[in-house]
Every structure is written in C-alpha cells, then in structure tokens.
Image (cartoon, rainbow, N blue to C red):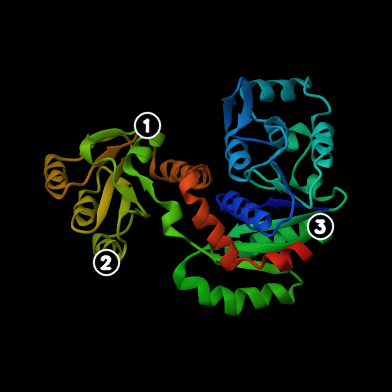
Amino acid sequence: MKRFYIGSIGKNSGKQVITLGLGLCIRERGLSLAYIKPVGREPVYHEGKLIDADALAFHSALGLSEPLKKTSPLVYSIDVMRKALSGKLKNQGQKIVRDISSLKADVVLIAGTTDIFEGSLIGINGLKISKMERTKAILVERYQTEETLDDILAGRELLGRTLCGVIINRVPGESMNEVKKEVVPYLEKKKVKVFGVVPEEKKLSAVTVKTLADTLGARVVCGEELLGGLVENFSIGAMDVTNALKFFRRTPNKAVITGAHRADIQMAALETSTRCIILTGGLLPNDVIIGKAIEKSVPILSVKEDTFATVDRIEALLGKAKVRDPERLPLIKALVNRHVDIDKLLVG
C-alpha cells in the first residue's frame, strides 16, 4: 500500500484536477483506490451530514466503496473555527491521522486543500500528513516562471525526504517547450523528480457567463438573455488601450475584467471576441458602452469588489467547476494520462 499526499505551496495550482485525474488513471490500471480529503473548505449537506463538496464529487466520480463521511472527516465551518479557538476541538489531528491510517487500498490519495499549511489550526497539515508511515508528498504547482521554482524548492526544504516529486501544472502553451527543456532538467539536477508537465486546458476552464454572474453576485447591466455563453479565457484590462487591443485580438471567447472608468478598454473589448465584460468597483458603464454591448451581443456584469478580489473569486470558481462536472471526467483523465508519468509516480 502507498499513500500520496497531493498538496501545493502556491494557491490555485489545479491540484484537485490532478488528484481526480490520478485517481481515474490508477483505477483504470486495476489497482484498488482510496481517497480522503482530511480538511475540507466547501461545506455542503448530503443526507443530513456536513461533507466537503470536492469529496462528495470525488466519491461519485471514483466509485469509492468507503462511507462518504470517511472521505471527508472535517470541514471548516464557523462552528469548527469557534471550537478550535476556544480549545474545545481536541485531538482532531490525531483522529484524522487514524482516519487516514484506516484506509486500506493499493493506493491512497490524500487531497490537500489551499496549501500544505492548511489545517494547522486543528493540529494537522500537509507537513504532518506527509510524515506518516508509507506516505509521500507530491507537490502540484501552477507554472508562473520563477515563482513556481521558488515554491518547489521551498517545498523541498520543508518536506525533505517525504517529497517524492512534483507535477508542474497549468503550463501556458507557449511555455511548454521552455518548461520541458529548461525547468525540468534544472529540477532534476536539484534532486527533485518531475512526474509531469501538464498544459493549461481551456476546455476545463470554460464556465458560463451565468455561473460567473452568480458566483460574483453581479448585477447584469445588459445581455441577460446571453448568459449561456461559454468563457474560456480571462483578461484584466489594466493596460493602455493600444496594447489591450492587441492582446484582446489574440484571446478569443474571453471575459474582460476592468474598472467602470476604463471606457477605452471596454470599447476595445467590444471590438474583439468577448463573451462578457466584468466591471469592478460597483459602478456602471456609460450609455455609449451599453449601446455598443447590446449591438455586439455582449453581456456586461457589474460587481462591487475590486479587480484583485474579483480575480481571486474567479480563480477559486474555476478549480471547483472542473472537478464537480461529470462531463469533464474523460477530459481530466485523458489530460493526466497523457502528461503525467503514472508508472514513475507509483514507484515514487
């Protein structure tokens, strides 16, 4: 039996997609599989019990035999937070260790949450889980040039011998060659095994304009009948209009996130392949922009939060949407099968 803790140093690395893909590929190899998400972040009620939403989706997608509650022993909530702060949540870390140890299968996948530090409040985190007997850590990091290398090398120092390797995920198409020819050899020289280099898959990131509006609590300024359009790319309109127009022309089926005061950026977006415009700061566009948007059949959404907060919420949404949509399972499985060396990973 082997246990793999799938975690990350950076946020929004796509580790839930990788974990699900690994599970699907491992099952296809005829190996028995168990899964657990020790600390959940997305509480949902299922049959009267509080369960993590990802764990619920994984339980169904992977056809797991153990009771659902066993895959999600704890989900952060206001009640859990209060108990932890008041000292009433005792021995929770030890209980989770016992829950992990009780899982019997050829391969046990232990899903991390935001990063390897989450869970410290209740006495358990990725660092502690990785030190369990017969457990190894796999870091999944989104490729963002030197920032990714900093995270991986810091992770190696923190995890030490418990780190068996990394998967570099969400690599932009134009960076795939650079990562394979320069980054991977560099990491291998640093004694860090690289199990895979996984490209950004736009089909996995696609969400409807309605989903964006609902998630962001947005006001639909115009185009309410067009909310079914699929958004595959996101652009932040914070540059000068000339560069923005060049970038927008290269980026199809996009949502443009910008301030309501940037009418120039909004007009540039409306001249290119844009699925919606998201205006931040709670302000509305001028009548000329609204008229042009109606003419071009582009919905405009207005949100109260600033641009950075809006982007953070969208990033979080994209990760959830990928693993909770059954129609995306074949794509997730194929992506991991094609770009991750499963056999090398299982050897550890």
Amino acid at pointer 3: Thr
Amino acid at pointer 1: Gly
Question: Is residue 27 toward the left or the right of residue 178 in the image?
Answer: right
Q: Is any part of residue 348 visible from this angle? A: no
Quarter of image, res 268: bottom left
Percent x, y for residue 170? 52, 60
Mark 3 vs mark 2: in front: 3
Percent x, y for residue 307? 39, 44
Characterize the local packing of mark 2: few (<14), some (14-19) or many (20 or more) Cα atoms within 10 angstroms. few
Label 2, on which residue? 246
Quarter of image, res 216: top left
In the depicted structure, whether residue 260 falls above or below residue 195: above
In the depicted structure, whether residue 46 falls above or below residue 322: above
In the depicted structure, whether residue 56 falls above or below residue 175: above
Front residue (pair 20, 274): 20
Question: Is residue 259 toward the left or the right of residue 298 in the image?
Answer: right
In the depicted structure, whether residue 137 falls above or below residue 228: below
Label 1, on which residue? 217
Label 3, on which residue? 162
